[in-house]
Image (spheres, helix red, strand yellow):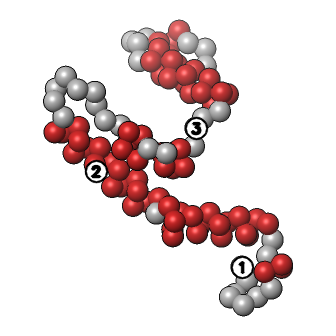
Amino acid sequence: MLAHGADPDAVSEDDYRLVMVAFSDGLIGNRGVLNTMGSLTTGIFNYIRSSNAKAYSLQDIIGSAYDYIYPPLTDEQKKNAANERLLSFISMMPGANENLKL
């Protein structure tokens, strides 16, 4: 990486992208703080909510920042995740490993 005062045109696109991500995460987004405080707030809200109320999720608490921290899955990733969950569920059955061809 180039030191401060270097020619900005000499910075590669990859290095520039990494600097922008670091800037967004550290100075603008404060990703770690947002994630930690959101999780703590979610836990507290779920603790004090009434028993028949809907449980809060991290997405409810931090709103649009949730998509920044946890990017939405593509359709292919959703399909693969569903298949993995189904396979995990089926493999919990006693004797499943002998009957499944993995």
- Which amino acid is tagged 3? Pro
How far from the left and from the top, in percent, is residue 26? Answer: 51, 68
In this rendering, would 94 be left or right of 10? Answer: left
* Cα–Cα span, label 3 and label 1: 31 Å
* Cα–Cα span, label 2 and label 1: 36 Å
Residue placed under numbered mark 1 in the picture: 1
- Please say whether residue 80 is visible from this viewpoint: no
* Cα–Cα span, label 2 and label 3: 22 Å
Proximity of marks 2 and 1: CB atoms separated by less than 8 Å: no
How far from the left and from the top, in percent, is residue 74? Answer: 65, 33
Residue placed under numbered mark 2 in the picture: 40
In this orientation, which residue lies closer to the viewer: 92 or 69?
69
How far from the left and from the top, in percent, is residue 100? Answer: 55, 12
Q: Along the polypeptide, which appears first: circle 3 or circle 1?
A: 1
**Helix, strand or loop under label 2:** helix
**In the rendered view of the protein, which quadrant contains the N terminus?**
bottom right
In this orientation, which residue lies closer to the viewer: 97 or 75?
75
Residue placed under numbered mark 3 in the picture: 72
